[in-house]
């Protein structure tokens, strides 16, 4: 049986998620055992437009990106968005709530008019259909491998849809709120083993919001500190910009 052919593509982002994959070290052999990598700019010179699975990093910010994403979607049987920029538009979406012309001037200066760009950075699944997502900034290497293994075996990947607070409690962490800090763990998708809080900092929300956070957020934590899920989402916009906008559009619709 032939192995599925896998291709990796990058859009607006730092390419840190692809570096995570390139840095799998000995586990990279496990990836090569189950897929044939035919396109991966970070680690190989060869290129191929013949692939079964497309892994996409980065958000879409230009009409050219949209055209390229549609070509990738047409070629691939399965599309997987990897990393926060691809799955939820990531840090790039910070610009979405700012004056676009001023953003362009800050980045490009006097040559801003030379660059064709959308006013808003978009997640990949807002442009094309995405079959699966690997969350995080950067992604967790082991989780990525598990997702790929599930896809190759024809199984649905197990992506958590409960708050980081659950993992914090299992790890017996002192709640960030009890330390006098503000944390978005109550509305953020778990799956990271609460790694940031484990190290004494806060959850920054890089895995995006859980589905229906107003209903599913960790109510015990929110109630204890007199907060609502909506207040938590509004307070912290580092990663939630695109999802907040999508939620507003859903309510309008």
Image (cartoon, rainbow, N blue to C red):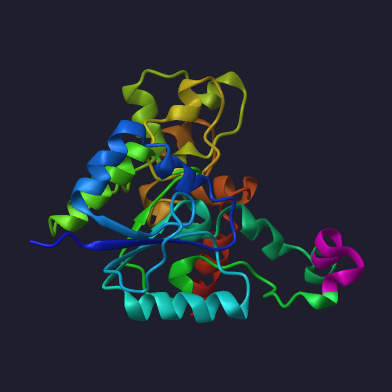
Residue displayed at 50% across by 29% down: 196
* Closest to the observer, 128 or 73: 73
* Closest to the observer, 76 or 177: 76
Where residue 131 appears, as percent x and y from the top left, is 30, 66
* Residue 144 position (above or below residue 92): above
172 falls in the magenta region: no
Query: Which span is picked out in magenta?
Result: 104-112
Residue 3 seen in the figure = yes
Where residue 221 appears, as percent x and y from the top left, is 45, 33
Main SS, magenta region, reads helix
Name, please, the residue furthest toward the left: 1
Q: Is residue 16 shown left or right of residue 195?
A: right
Query: Residue 177's quadrant in the figure?
Result: top right
**For the N terminus, which image quadrant?**
bottom left
Residue displayed at 26% across by 73% down: 77
Residue displayed at 33% across by 45% down: 144
* Residue 71 position (above or below residue 106): below
Q: Is residue 209 shown left or right of residue 5?
A: right
Name, please, the residue furthest toward the right: 110
Query: Residue 202's quadrant in the figure?
Result: top right
* Closest to the observer, 170 or 37: 37
């Amino acid at each position: 049986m032939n192995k599925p052919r896998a291709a990796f593509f990058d859009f607006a982002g730092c390419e840190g998620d692809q570096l995570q994959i390139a840095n799998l070290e000995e586990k990279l052999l496990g990836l090569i055992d189950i897929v044939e990598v035919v396109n991966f700019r970070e680690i190989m010179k060869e290129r191929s437009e013949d692939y079964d699975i497309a892994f996409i990093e980065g958000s879409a910010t230009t009409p050219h990106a949209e055209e390229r994403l549609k070509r990738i979607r047409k070629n691939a049987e399965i599309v997987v968005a990897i990393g926060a920029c691809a799955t939820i538009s990531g840090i790039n979406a910070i610009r979405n709530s700012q004056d676009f012309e001023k953003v362009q001037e800050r980045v490009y200066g006097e040559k801003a008019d030379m660059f064709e760009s959308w006013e808003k950075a978009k997640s990949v699944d807002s442009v094309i259909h995405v079959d699966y997502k690997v969350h995080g900034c950067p992604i967790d290497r082991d989780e990525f491998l598990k997702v790929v293994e599930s896809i190759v075996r024809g199984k649905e990947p197990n992506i958590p849809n409960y708050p980081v607070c659950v993992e914090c409690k299992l790890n017996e962490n002192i709640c960030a709120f009890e330390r006098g800090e503000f944390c978005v763990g109550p509305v953020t998708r778990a799956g990271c083993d609460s790694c940031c809080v484990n190290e004494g900092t806060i959850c920054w929300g890089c895995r995006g919001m859980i589905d229906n956070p107003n209903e599913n957020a960790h109510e015990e934590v929110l109630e204890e500190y007199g907060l609502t899920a909506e207040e938590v989402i509004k307070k912290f916009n580092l990663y939630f910009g695109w999802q907040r906008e999508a939620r507003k559009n859903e309510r309008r619709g």
